[in-house]
Every structure is written in C-alpha cells, then in structure tokens.
C-alpha cells in the first residue's frame, strides 16, 4: 500500500556500553518513520487532532533479529497495511549498506472521537480520503 523509508545514523546517546542500541529506542525509530509516513499522506498528528480524532497506539510488537550499533546507518520503513477498522503499520529496520534486516514490528492505532472519547469501530472517512480510497 503506502510506505515511506527514513534513514537514521545511530547516535551515541542511543547505545549502551557495548555500543548496541538499547531495545526501547527501536520504538523511537518506528515513531520517526511513522510520523514521516503520516506526513506523506498529509494526515499527521496535528491534522488528526484538527479533524476531531485522536489515534492512540493500542498494540506494538517488535521482533529483534540483529542489533543496530553506534554509527550504523539504518533504514526504517513504515508501511500502512490495514486501515478499515484500525490503522496497522508494519516496520522494518535494515542496515542501509547491506540491506540486512535487523528488526521488524508493527503498531496498531484506533480512532477515538475527540469530543465523545468513544472508540470508533471503523476508521473515519478522513483517513480513507487521505489514503485515496474514497
């Protein structure tokens, strides 16, 4: 469907004493790619809020295959794979130079009506419009 890739040079402040990225920072890398993807479809978090919806993450999974290390150039790809009832985004982190997969995962978000605070059981029309489906 729709995907976007960002490149990140692993900074020193993201690694432990063995120069391996701390496991929690992979979530940050996913978020950086997700924000770039949402910008690409012209429906970032500010636009979500302005359209009357919040989109909290309700599920997040990460599978670590190989560690990212200090100074490594990584590519983080985010791809929208579900949108009807929820927003599911798959992620893949690879070594930019070799293409070797380091990590994969996904996040699931649901729309919450900002006024009623009720969870929507289908994605609002605005998301479908941004995706070019309607």
Image (cartoon, rainbow, N blue to C red):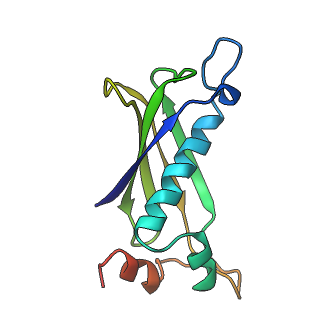
Q: Locate the C terminus by quadrant.
A: bottom left
The image quadrant that residue 74 belongs to is top left
Locate residue 89, reporting x and y percent.
44, 55
Q: Can residue 112 be seen in this view?
A: no
Residue at the limit of the structure toward the top, as seen here: 18
Q: Is residue 14 above or below residue 49?
A: above
Residue drawn at point x = 44 percent, y = 78 percent: 127
Q: In this view, does 76 lie above or below 42?
A: above
Residue drawn at point x = 71 percent, y = 80 percent: 117
Q: Is residue 64 visible?
A: yes
Q: Is residue 129 above or below residue 88?
A: below
Residue drawn at point x = 30 percent, y = 78 percent: 132
Locate residue 50, reporting x and y percent.
62, 84
Q: Locate the N terminus by quadrant.
A: bottom left
Locate residue 111, reporting x and y percent.
57, 74
Residue drawn at point x = 38 percent, y = 63 percent: 82
Left or right position of 54 against 36: right
Q: In this view, does 96 lie above or below 121?
A: above
Across the whole image, how many numbered discs are drawn on residues? 0
Left or right position of 55 against 131: right
The image quadrant that residue 99 belongs to is top left
Locate residue 61, reporting x and y percent.
53, 42
């Amino acid at each position: 469907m729709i995907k976007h890739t960002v490149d990140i040079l692993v900074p020193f402040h993201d690694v432990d004493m063995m120069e391996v990225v701390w496991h929690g920072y992979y979530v940050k890398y996913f978020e950086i790619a997700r924000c770039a993807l949402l910008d690409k479809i012209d429906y970032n978090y500010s636009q979500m809020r302005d359209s009357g919806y919040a989109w909290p993450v309700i599920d997040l999974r990460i599978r670590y295959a190989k560690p990212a290390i200090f100074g490594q150039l990584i590519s983080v790809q985010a791809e929208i794979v579900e949108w009807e009832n929820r927003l599911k985004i798959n992620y893949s982190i690879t070594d930019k130079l070799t293409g070797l997969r380091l990590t994969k995962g996904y996040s699931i978000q649901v729309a919450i009506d900002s006024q009623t605070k009720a969870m929507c059981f289908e994605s609002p029309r605005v998301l479908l419009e941004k995706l070019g489906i309607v």
